[in-house]
Amino acid sequence: MKAKSIIIASALIAAAIVVLGFALKGGIDRFADRDRVVTVRGLCEKEVNANKVTWPIVTKEMGNDLGSIYTKIQSSNQSIVSFLKSNGIADAEISVNPPSVYDNFADRYSTQNLTYRYQVTNVVVVTSDKVELVRELIKKQTELLRQGIAVVAGDYNYQTRYEYTDLNSIKPEMIAEATANARQAADKFASDSDSKLGKIKTASQGQFSIEDRDQYTPNIKTVRIVTYITYYLED
């Protein structure tokens, strides 16, 4: 009986060792599979129209008498504001900035023989969501020339700016599309490597960027988002 018990116990131990071996092997295989991953990038781009415009209307006056210059500026501002309001721009969308005065004679490094002592820059700013209306007015601003108002163009410090401020309304759709594009790329990689796509290991969403579509149409923006997703690969 004792010998028989020893044999049975030995058999049980051997069986347990075999089972444990298979379990260890399965665990090692599964652990090894966890190292098999693929990282893909999902891109989504969308063109949108700007929904906000900031248009600085710049005029400059030169002279030797500040009082006379001030009178001219006041007259110019009234004409500009009247032009804007008569074309559909509301009072709340118009801002008249304080004039900026530069005294040429105060520049001790200047060696030029200057005719005028003062140079005054005056800026009337339109900030509006009526983008297309403002674009039409920019084309029509030559009407101010008939009134003797010379609008300064091409000043780097006073550029017309177009913005898109409704990003939250398109975020979910763009994130979903970028994620779907990433999944499609991962599926293709898995198929080419005779594998199956597993669960997501890590995922990160890049920042949204909003840029001009090109230098000729700053009122049209390109919104861009990139997602990075790492998937497990399985046999």
Image (tube, rainbow, N blue to C red):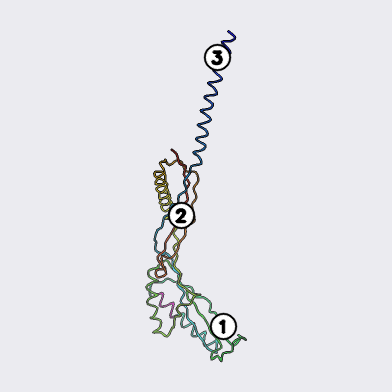
Vertical relation: 93 (above or below) 6: below
Residue at the spot 37% in from the left edge and 77% down from the top edge:
140
Residue pointed to by mark 1: 102
Mark 3 burial class by Cα count in 10 Å: few <14, some 14-19, many 20+: few
In contact (CB < 8 Å): disc 1 and disc 2 = no
- The correct choice, above or below, for 197 with respect to 152 in the image is above
Q: Which mark is residue 8?
A: 3
Q: Earlier in the sequence, mark 1 or mark 3?
A: 3
Q: With 177 as the anchor, is 26 left or right in this view? A: right
Give the residue displayed 47% in from the left and 76% down from the top: 124
CA neighbours of label 2 inside 10 A, class few (<14), some (14 to 19), many (20+): many
Q: Amino acid at mark 1?
A: Tyr
Q: Earlier in the sequence, mark 1 or mark 2?
A: 1
Percent position of residue 103, x then y: 58, 85
Relative placement, left or right, of 179 versus 105 is: left
Predominant SS along the magenta part: helix
Going by the image, does 190 lie left or right of 119?
left
Quarter of the image that includes the C terminus = top left
Q: Amino acid at mark 2?
A: Val
Using the image, determine if residue 87 lies above or below residue 32: below
| Quarter of the image with the N terminus in it | top right
Marks 2 and 3 close (CB-CB < 8 Å): no
Residue 213 percent coordinates (x, y): 41, 65
Q: In the structure shown, which secondary structural element does the residue marked by tag 2 occupy?
A: strand
What kind of residue is marked 3?
Ile
Which residues fall within the magenta stretch?
Answer: 79-85
Residue at disc 3, secondary structure: helix
Residue marked by disc 2: 226
Foreground mark, 1 or 2, reads 2
Query: Image height check: is 166 above or below 184?
Result: below
